[in-house]
Structure formats: C-alpha cells, structure tokens
Image: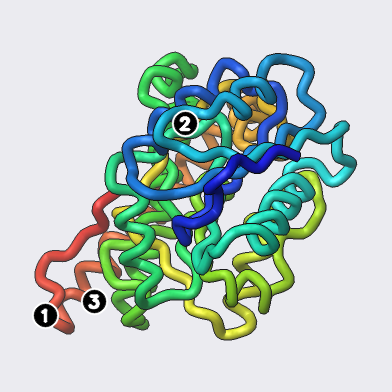
Amino acid sequence: MNVPRGWGRTGFVVVIPARNEAERLPHAFAALAGEGALDIVVVANGCVDGTSAIAREGRTPLRVATIETDPLTGGVGAARRMGMTLALERASAPILATTDADCRVRPGWLAATRTALERADAVCGYVEPDATEFGALPPLVREHGTLEDLRDGLRAHLAALQAPAPHNPLPCHGQTPGASLAFTARAYRMAGGFEAIPCHEDRRLIARMAAMGLRVARPATVRVAASCRLEGRAPGGMAATIAARRDDAPRLHREIADMTQEIAALRRAIAKACAADRTWGDSLPAA
C-alpha cells in the first residue's frame, strides 16, 4: 500500500480497480485530472504489466493511493471493496465513487455527481461507448446496442413520468454501472459496501440501497465513456457481453425485433403521459 502525503483531504475519493491496465489507465487519469479536487485509489489486482508503476506515478494534479495485491479470488468486487475500505479508514471522504480503468469520465462528471448527491444518497452514471471502438464493432452488434440503450432510456423516462421523484429528476436513465457510481459514505456503510464477488457487485449494492429506502439517482448529466473491447478483465462484464453478442446473430435479430416493438410502445406511452400532464411538454429522454 502506498498513500502519498496530503492524500484524502478533498472529501471525494474515486476507487479504480485495475487488472493489467497499463495502456488505458493513463487515459482514465487524464480525464479525472481535469475534474477538480478529488483523490484516487487504484487497486492493482494481480497486475503483471506496468499498471502499478503508472498508478504510483500518478498524474498532476491527482493524488493517487495504490494498493497492490496478488490476484483476488473475489475479482473486481473484492478490489472495489478494498479501495473503499482504505477511503473510509484514511480519508475525510463524505463522498465515495468508483469507475473503471478502461473508462474516461466526461467533462463535468465531478460537478454533476456532487450536484446529484445534494438530493440523493447514491448516483449511477450513464455509460456511453467509446465512439472509435464502438464504430469498429459488427453492424448488427452496433444496432442492437443502440436500440438497447434507447429502450432502457425510454423505460426510465416513462417510470420518472409516472412516479416523479425529487431526487431523480428528468432527464434520467436506467443504468447501474460500476463504471460510474457514487455514494455518501453513510449510505455505503448502511448498505454493507461492495461484495467481494467477480461480477455484478455494482447492481447488487445499488439494489440493496434501493431496498433499504435510500435515494438512488440516475442523472443523464453524469457521463462516462467506456471501452468496447472484446477481451475484458472481469467475467460477465461488458467485454464478455459484447463478445457473446458478436457470436450469436440469430439471437440479435430476435432481440432487435422485440426491442423495436417495445420502443414504439414506450414512445406511445410517453406521449400519452405527457398529454395527460402538459407540464412535461413533449418530453423525450436525452439519450
């Protein structure tokens, strides 16, 4: 463990689990460096490349604490939990956040997250694919991904129209990504933190928070760009999902047809909800 002098004083800690991410971690740092005052924990999980050295070196003006481990049996969930534990023990951090080493937060991510947490206990960011890598995917995979994103956005939008919540105003989305999560330290402790599991630790934590009555927001203004690579680090993660879709064209065709029908139905339902309450105008989701 390496914790540099002055680390942990900003009140906002970002945990980044990393497994052999020497190529992409500098880009994640560069994006975070433009966001303002924050502290970072990189949990280098069984890395055999230059990830640990890059994390220790950091990037001005970032302060980066590093934890180097042998491969963790609990995978990314264990790495996130380990980083959060350090933040709770060593930082004056009322806000805990996490992203991934192959992601780049969009400009304004920090400010938008802080603003959302003024009314919520947890904030789920919106993940968009890296444009260059997305463009290199097979056309059918791109079509499926675009429709899936639109469908999920319309679902979230309709739900917000039908049951408005002050802590989750429009425009909002329906994602729960480890690539962009943030919580108050109190909410994180109440929910028991991340589980030490190889995948879905993000969804399970947010589900527990919601079940406890904590306020979960999904603002469209909190955005992060994620890799579309086909060989990822976490089993069951985004890379595995994309690779499975690439190899199953019949399934994609079926799901594209189903989503096209659902999208049309959701648009009709949203139009009906807006017509019933004209305060919404001709409201459609930002996505």
Secondary structure at badge 3 equals helix
Q: Identify which residue is drawn at 75% across, 51% down.
A: 82
Secondary structure at badge 1 equals helix
Residue at which label 2 appears: 29
Asked if the residues shown at circle 1 and circle 2 are in contact, with their CB atoms under 8 angstroms apart, the answer is no
User: Residues under labels 1 and 2: Cα distance?
Assistant: 42 Å
* Residue 188 appears in the figure: yes
Tell me, for residue 273, which label it has, or none: 3
User: Residues under labels 3 and 1: Cα distance?
Assistant: 10 Å
Q: Is residue 183 above or below residue 63?
A: below
Residue type at mark 1 is Thr
Precedes in sequence: disc 3 or disc 2: 2
Q: Is residue 147 above or below residue 286?
A: above
Q: Is residue 280 above or below residue 45?
A: below
User: Residues under labels 3 and 2: Cα distance?
Assistant: 42 Å
* Residue 235 appears in the figure: no
Q: Nearer the viewer, residue 157 or 49?
A: 49
Precedes in sequence: disc 3 or disc 1: 3
Tell me, for residue 129, which label it has, or none: none
Expressed as whole percent of the image width and height from the top left, the position of residue 1 reads 75, 40
Residue type at mark 3 is Ala
Residue at which label 1 appears: 279
Q: Identify which residue is drawn at 65% across, 42% down.
A: 3
Precedes in sequence: disc 1 or disc 2: 2
Asked if the residues shown at circle 3 and circle 2 are in contact, with their CB atoms under 8 angstroms apart, the answer is no
Tell which tag, 1 or 2, sits nearer the viewer.
Answer: 2
Secondary structure at badge 2 equals helix
